[in-house]
Amino acid sequence: MMAAANCLLSEEQFLCCICLDIFIDPVTIPCGHNFCKKCITQHWTVNSSRLQCPMCKKQFTTRPELPVNTFISEMAAEFRQSAGKKGSCCSDLKVAKPEEIPCDVCAGTKFKAVKSCLTCFASYCGIHLDPHQTSERLKTHQLTDPVKNLESRVCTMHNKPLELFCKTDQTCVCSQCIISDHSTHTIGSLKDECEVRKADLQQVEAEIQQMIQERRTKSDQIQHLKTHSKEDAEREIACGVRVFTSLMQMAERGLNELIEMIEERQRETEEEADGCIKELEEEISVLMKRTAEVQQLSHTNDYLNVLQSFKWMISGLQVKNWTEVSIHPPSYEGTMLKGVSELMKMLSREQERLLHTDRLGRVQHYAVDVTLEPLTANPWLILSDDGKQVSPSEVKKDLPDNAERFSLYSNVIAQQSFSSGRFYYEVQVAGKTDWTLGVVKASVDRKGIIPICPLNGYWAVGLRNGRDYLSLASPVVSLSLKSQPQRVGVFVSYEEGLVSFYDVDEALLIYSFTDSLFFTENIYPFFSPGPLLSSHGGVNSAPLIISPVTQSE
């Protein structure tokens, strides 16, 4: 114990203020302060422009000599040896960092605590822990890894350690509590109750992990939507630029045509006026010449000449009667309004065309490769080898009635499924009198006879009798189309619950299902080429063909 006491009295004297460790080769500089030789040498090498003591800041004009302090060196060696005898705990002797638990006994510089005593309610460094390892009385104390807030482990009523657990009140108690306020309660050890709680914690951890996973999934969905929103915004801006540029160019062309038309009419008027003026000037010239001849004849004394010329002079001149001749300047009243009206009609048609084309172009951006899944095909269907065509058959195939196959409806679905994001594909329907296209949920009934509608997991449109276009909603909606689609585009935005159908060649929207409830299921593109013989007697042998997507211009 004397050795420990000596250490306690001199511990701060053996610490280098640079490395905060026990001196190694201690040297004394002129101001009287001690440092490890290596530490002070490196310090002055780094700060060569200012040679000063790290402690008192005394400056030196030249680098001082570094004589070894033999006394401090021997004491430091003895201290290190004494600390080494105290066991492995002392080998961890380090100055406590702000985030670490300090020794409660150290005066001045606080060493890092290596143990906390739950009996003494104090934390100790390797040196000050020595009494707990050597004293028979202190050896019975309960030691643990360093902990904060030791006061929270003391009973506030009896000032004794909380060593037991009251199951009745579900609280930690001390030995005095169980003979007073908790005397009739069920008492257990902290360890036993801790084991029970740890088992509960496993369940809590599992629930938390589930919550984490749910939030990560939600975060991914939101991130996905954020990305799509940004892409949509960029495409909408590009669309706006294209549409407005086209409309402005059309308006400029309309203005130029209006100006050209007005200028052309003005040129025609000027040419007519110039022609009249020229003709009048020519007649004026003729008349002035005749006037001169008349005047000359009037003043002559040649009687014979006057009589001979008189008849010719008074005869009618070959000139135009200008009484009914007039120039009518063109009236421009209403010209501008008419031009603007025609331009507005053109702009409206162009706007509609551009918007439809751009709307289709935006969804075509999400084109995916779709291939038919033979295992799901109804036995009355024929699939091409490349999985891109399906047509009705005259003969029913002998196929296993596996769970994936549609048994009653002439349906087939794609190999590809989707549970998030957006996708688009196109199907050629030319030459057919009956077909159905759309998407289905993975859980759709493939064996029974059920209405094809969203309630049963179908989102589809179709053609019946070669002329009746339908949306298979609840109830069925008849569709009035400007023309018969030759190619149908199908677009799905999973998170929005949106399923839209397009006439690709006309760039027109056919129909949209909104707020569709997919219930987080996978959905599949599905195809039904209809029966071989239509109900109106026509032949429906043409295939449905999954077509490559070409971006609309």
Image: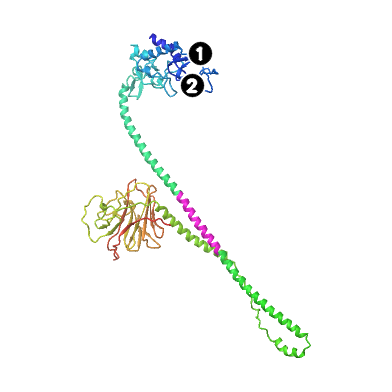
Q: Is residue 448 magenta?
A: no
Closest to the observer: 225 or 179? Answer: 225
Residue carrying label 1: 32
Tell me the CA gap for discs 2 and 1. 17 Å
Closest to the observer: 199 or 382? Answer: 382
On the image, the x and y values in percent for residue 114 come to 38, 19
On the image, the x and y values in percent for residue 199 come to 30, 29
Image-quadrant location for residue 183 = top left
Q: Image quadrant for the C terminus? A: bottom left
Tell me the amino acid under the disc marked 1: Gly
Residue carrying label 2: 43
For the record, the magenta segment spans: 234-257
Q: Please, is residue 32 above or below residue 523 in the view?
A: above
Image-quadrant location for residue 267 = bottom right
Look at the numbered disc 2 and give the secondary structure of its residue: helix
Q: Is any part of residue 279 visible from this angle?
A: yes
* Mark number displayed over residue 50: none
Query: In this image, 52 relative to 414: left or right?
Result: right
Closest to the observer: 541 or 11? Answer: 11
